[in-house]
């Protein structure tokens, strides 16, 4: 049979199994989302519809792959943490990253209409990657890194768009105004000039979104819930000790 | 700044650059499409709406990533061939496979309504992988393998569903009937029992779909065209000598 | 200059950096040492000259690469444990395994005459590999695996050669005699038939050799010392708590 | 049995199979050979004893691993080319590079006395790496790169040591004298100042050493022979067409 003559080409596939006993992180990032968000008139500095759509997709991924114990989303990115002992797809990195990225992407289009009245103009693209973390500390530091990044970007964006939208600054002038400022300066600027208490801004903007499995007492089963809390300090981890156990 | 303390976790990302001077193949496969196709009442043995939707998604991917010189689709799978000298994303395997899989997946949902009247019930998932082929012969053998696979499956499915749909066989009886038969037997069965000349079946079913860039003389630019021709013999390759040059 | 035209071939070298925060183990194994040991008339079941030569080579490797915190040798194999934070050769796996294997191999020939009166007949070959272990438990289990292996093999070989050398069994008869026996049976056989108390056999045969850095009080510096102790239980690790700290 | 409890650690070994249908190159480099050569008083600019010892080791490696079709040595480095279809050790990169590096290293010590009257003071170390080349052109360019490198270094060193040894230059003065010179300048300097016709220098210095299998007509078997010829032009490859066939 002709088939067998060509089948040797399967042997060129190479193994890419994730090292065992490591946390597997799959992180997605929107491709060219600067353009995508302006073409779909996302609100600035944050569009809650877009963030809630991202969270909806994140939930869909976690429900499909219950080995994911935690999701973290901010802006146009999402990280999924697979439990250390995960053996899904034999821990093959390609399978893990493409399945997650694919389902997230198709969900984004599928659930778009639940969040946006405007029509989706073209299918978006996300890229994905796998990163391994050997220790619990490394994993927590990874999540702390992403949440610190969320905070830094959001404080900047909140200040920038306050200057533009309320302060009538031009875009370049707003950029210039913020150049060289630290967190304290930006907090001060927001409060004194725009009466914005940054700490009172919605937590979903400041902290990003944490997705995790919680017992739903009414329905007597586990569900994915979304929280917008600090994930850097110890409180979250002592309160959710099942995650690292 | 808090950020820097955690940023070291970036160093855990590992290099996965594709070996240079090799053909890069990204192949997608539908996940659980047996269930997906029955839930969406795909026609048996082949649903031309589903195949044309796949081809539409394949085109969308090729237009976004012009380094793809050839696409080949059949059933719920699609292969994309990047040119040997491709340097997209620095040849990083993760980036290549996730971007392609993501855009294909979001396009599938986005363009669904162009091909199906029935509503899409849930977002589909595709997985992806990267395989490298060092020589032109290896690449041709890869494509021959997929097209031979298409032929074998389609001949079987055509016979199977003829027995069921026209011959009133039960599913297990149809399976039993075909057990141990070779290509000749199936061709003969189709012709003698159902007056089906297999070679006259639509080429899209027998050969799958080949997507490639062709000069559009009218619009004076290159476009992705879809063909359903033999890719195993030399004719295709001499007629499209630009592909391997 | 002609050079530059060809230099692009360097780009084909691929990254193979070991995942950070993991224990790096390099293990060597003698190639065809069954033949090598019989051609050099190694004593059976154990040749202390050969084992001491192995340990000498192990020491030479550790002195050259002080990031190695522990060595474990038995029979014709040696494992070297690099500290988790090791950044030697930028953690490139190729560099780590080839440097260690090379120096071990050249040392074996170089120090041969210190242990053997008979001439070395041809240069021996060792192969090497790198394995990563994310947790302290994984590392301890690795070393336990090797020491358990040493015990099992040595108990078998001691029994086998007692039957042959003292019991006048033929080789196949000795093999048959031991077939299906467990540890208790072999201990009993050694004691009742040959008055050998296995637990009194030299520890270097039963436990293998553990090489580690210890403060040399006299010379006021760290030296590599060789011990033949249990590495499976907790005692070794509490007594050498610096290793996992 | 205790063994089985720990044996899971074997699962942490990761696959590193070389992509099929590619040329496998294993290249060795002496570690700290600047120091090694001065401690063993190697002649400058070239020590024919050292080069012949390297070649002897190269031969030993090729005889042990007949899948190596070509060796190329210069200075303290050696490259071994495995045939494309090589399946030795299942193409595992670790096995290939460590076996070759180990045997080369042990041979270096073993055969030292055949070439040097002075005693070897300590065991030398070589590192190794694996590089894959998909096409014949890539492989030829790799070898051209190494031979061009040999030429460049040797022309420089010949000039440098002529200035020092015959011209009584200090080392820094010799370096300064050559700074900014091209090949022509160095050829001219050698000829006008020291009556050295560079092209008449021994080919082993200018071209390095090529090791390949040739039919030994007398002994009616294949032997490894050493040549010092140009490997950059076409002549070598047409004259040894079996290599790339």
Image: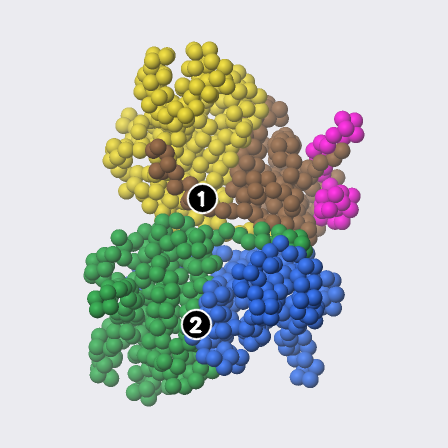
Chain colours: A green, B blue, C yellow, D brown
Magenta region: which residues?
Answer: D216-245
Asked if the stretch drawn in magenta spans residue D230, the answer is: yes
Parent chain of label 2:
B
Q: Is residue B45 left or right of residue A94?
A: right
2 vs 1, front mark: 2
Residue drawn 57% across and 62% down? B174
Residue drawn 47% across and 58% down? A94
x then y, percent, for residue B110? 48, 78
Which residue is the site of mark 1? D13
- Foreground: D157 or C77? C77
Q: Is residue B27 left or right of residue A221?
A: right
- Foreground: B52 or A195? B52
Parent chain of label 1:
D
Q: Quadrant of the N terminus of chain C?
A: bottom right
Q: Residues within 10 Å of mark 2 (few under 14, many from 20)?
A: many
Query: Cβ–Cβ below 8 Å for labels 2 and 1?
Result: no
Whether residue B147 appears in this view of the structure is: no
Task: Find numbered disc 1 in the image and state the secondary structure of the residue it sits on.
Answer: loop
Q: Which of the 4 quarters of the picture holds residue B222? A: bottom right
Task: Find numbered disc 2 in the image and state the secondary structure of the residue it sits on.
Answer: loop
Q: Which of the 4 quarters of the picture holds residue B87? A: bottom right
x then y, percent, for residue C168? 46, 11
Q: Residues within 10 Å of mark 1 (few under 14, many from 20)?
A: some
Residue drawn 44% across and 82% down? A120
In the drawing, what numbered circle is on residue B123? Answer: 2
Residue placed furthest toward the front: B168
Q: CA distance from mark 2 to mark 1?
A: 37 Å
- Foreground: B218 or B12? B218
Q: Is residue B119 above or below residue D144?
A: below
In the drawing, what numbered circle is on residue D168? Answer: none
Q: Is residue D183 above or below residue D107?
A: below
Asked if the stretch drawn in magenta spans residue A49, the answer is: no
């Amino acid at each position: 049979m002709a088939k067998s003559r060509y089948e040797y080409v399967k042997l060129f596939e190479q193994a890419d199994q994730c090292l065992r006993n490591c946390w597997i992180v799959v992180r997605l990032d929107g491709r060219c989302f600067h353009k995508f968000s302006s073409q779909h008139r996302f609100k600035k500095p944050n569009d809650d519809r877009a963030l809630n759509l991202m969270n909806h997709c994140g939930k869909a991924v976690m429900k499909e792959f219950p080995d994911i114990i935690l999701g973290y989303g901010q802006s146009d990115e999402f990280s999924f943490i697979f439990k250390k002992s995960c053996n899904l797809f034999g821990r093959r990195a390609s399978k893990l990253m493409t399945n997650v990225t694919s389902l997230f992407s198709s969900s984004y289009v599928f659930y778009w209409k639940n969040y946006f009245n405007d029509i989706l103009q073209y299918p978006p693209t996300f890229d994905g990657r796998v990163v391994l973390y050997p220790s619990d500390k490394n994993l927590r530091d990874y999540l702390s890194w992403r949440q610190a990044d969320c905070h830094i970007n959001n404080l900047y964006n909140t200040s920038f768009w306050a200057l533009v939208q309320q302060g009538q600054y031009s875009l370049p002038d707003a950029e210039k105004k913020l150049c060289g400022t630290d967190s304290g300066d930006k907090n001060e600027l927001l409060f004194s000039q725009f009466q914005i208490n940054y700490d009172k801004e919605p937590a979903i903007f400041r902290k990003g979104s944490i997705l995790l499995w919680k017992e739903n007492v009414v329905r007597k089963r586990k569900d994915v819930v979304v929280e917008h809390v600090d994930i850097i300090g110890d409180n979250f981890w002592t309160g959710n000790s099942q995650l690292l156990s």
